[in-house]
Image (spheres, coloured by chain):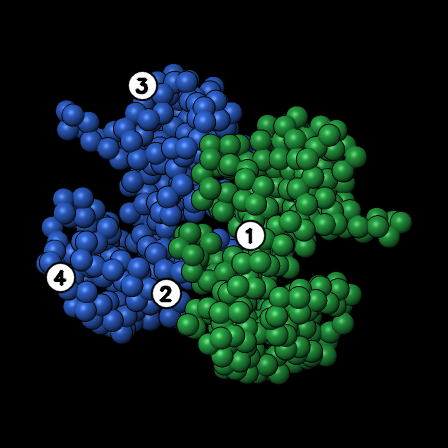
Chain colours: A green, B blue
Amino acid sequence: MAELLKGAAVVAAINEKMMADIAALKVKGISPTLAILRVGERDDDISYERGAMKRCDTVGVAVKNVILPSDVKQDVLMQSIETLNNDASVHGVLIFRPLPKQIDEEAVRKALKPAKDIDGITDGSLAGVFTGSGEGFAPCTAQACMEILDYYKVDCKGKRATVIGRSLVVGKPAAIMLLGKHATVTVCHTRTVDMPSVARNAEILIVAAGKANAVTKEYLAPGQIVVDVGINMTDEGKLCGDVKFGDAEPIVGAITPVPGGVGTVTTSVLVSHVVEAAKKLL
Amino acid sequence: MAELLKGAAVVAAINEKMMADIAALKVKGISPTLAILRVGERDDDISYERGAMKRCDTVGVAVKNVILPSDVKQDVLMQSIETLNNDASVHGVLIFRPLPKQIDEEAVRKALKPAKDIDGITDGSLAGVFTGSGEGFAPCTAQACMEILDYYKVDCKGKRATVIGRSLVVGKPAAIMLLGKHATVTVCHTRTVDMPSVARNAEILIVAAGKANAVTKEYLAPGQIVVDVGINMTDEGKLCGDVKFGDAEPIVGAITPVPGGVGTVTTSVLVSHVVEAAKKLL
């Protein structure tokens, strides 16, 4: 029976710290504010937006919604970003991606002011993750994995940590952050030969495969700590992770549930970045 | 008997391509120029500088030397960088590091114009490596390892590639570049438990341990491709790598010699970056 690494406890700890910071900021007349820039009406975006707004409301972070039509022109979008860059009342900006086809996403990424890049999409933030300088903000999902490991006191030092997935939002930054925690880090992906044996060899396994039930029992070993980043919808309309939970639960040492694991912590990390961005003004 | 992956052939191939590019640039009135900014008189720096100047001379890249005293003040150094940033005749700038203690190296790194960052030290270049966008220039040593693998037609796809070392100039960028070549990548370092068995499991082994003879026979396996990044001096005053060559040679499939391996290719990569920087002006 694996220990369940529930996100709720991690969220509570992050919130507690955040609320103290927010109180201190408000005394100084600063009200931490997140701007959410959404293009179009994608269900995923709206669902994430709703979650983020609720979390902001709980802790006392203000939200400013900017919604543009899905056929928005590049210059209008760029102008919106410029306005948010220059709006002193906005401390962090979340831009939903992928953006529609007519938009040059690279230009959008570059247009955002690094100090407001609470989602870790600018060169400054990505270089900050890569160099470990602490500059900018790490991609929230990758950081959420680390927050969970930290909260549950998983010591990564010298451990074999394997990341499945090499995306810029999870796999690569998580790998670099695990290196910073002194783990011996392996990154697997779709081209990996015999992934089950590579995964089985890990003491800490971060799964960001982006595919329901991608990780089955032949990937798993007794005692492993498994962090499941996946959020997928089953045919029956239920949420599930990238790890086949029924396979993992009897084998591994600990695992994050889906829902109620990485996803919920990610939202808190996002909100905490807004507070951190506001604190830098002090 | 391991195949020797000599740098000379790689250098010749890089030079050939570079010289065609340089000829085309000169027709357009552009003479690719490298500025070398050296603080103080460290032997390592002077030796590398001499090598780079010779290589530039061979292919027809001009060199501008800027030498500052080891007790230079921050503002004088920053002014030198600003001058080089604004000098249209200079296409790439190499700044020797580490800089003396009185210098804020981070500020120096940030002061350099990304377009002239041929040594991959700015945020733009590091983010370019991390995202794979091709922006900026990769750290030359890490790229030299890739040039050797490419030249000798080592197919990394799906292979287990292990990097020993996690520095920003070699280990981390090499790991990310190997991921880009679709290898399954593991990064080891001083905190790694049982490094010999991790290393033995690799099909491609990049060694940037920074220590003479750090890799002995228990780290090696038949058929491995070994790239030895180390440049160390033995007690007898001879150059040697991080791999104990006598141990490796009878076991592995192929290995880069030291000297005559990665180091010589690194210099060519540096010079080729100057040419690439100049080409971007066309």
Name the secondary structure under disc 3.
helix
Question: Which numbered mark, 3 or 2, is in the foreground of this view?
Answer: 2
Left or right of B259? Residue A155 is: right
Question: Which numbered mark, 4 or 3, is in the foreground of this view?
Answer: 4
Residue B59 or A147: which is nearer the viewer?
Answer: A147
Q: Are marks 3 and 2 in contact (CB under 8 Å)?
A: no
Q: Is residue A59 visible?
A: yes
Q: Position of residue B68 (x, y in %)?
A: 13, 60
Residue A65 or B265: which is nearer the viewer?
Answer: A65
Q: Which sits earlier in the primary sequence, circle 3 or circle 2?
A: 2
**Residue A99 found in image quarter:** bottom right
State which chain disc 1 sits on. A
User: Does B16 sit above or below residue A164?
Assistant: below
Q: Is residue B25 visible?
A: no
* Residue that mark 2 sits on: B114
Crowding near the residue tagged with mark 1, few <14, some 14–19, many ≥20 C-alpha atoms within 10 Å: many
Q: Amino acid at mark 1?
A: Gln
* Residue that mark 1 sits on: A143
* Residue that mark 3 sits on: B246
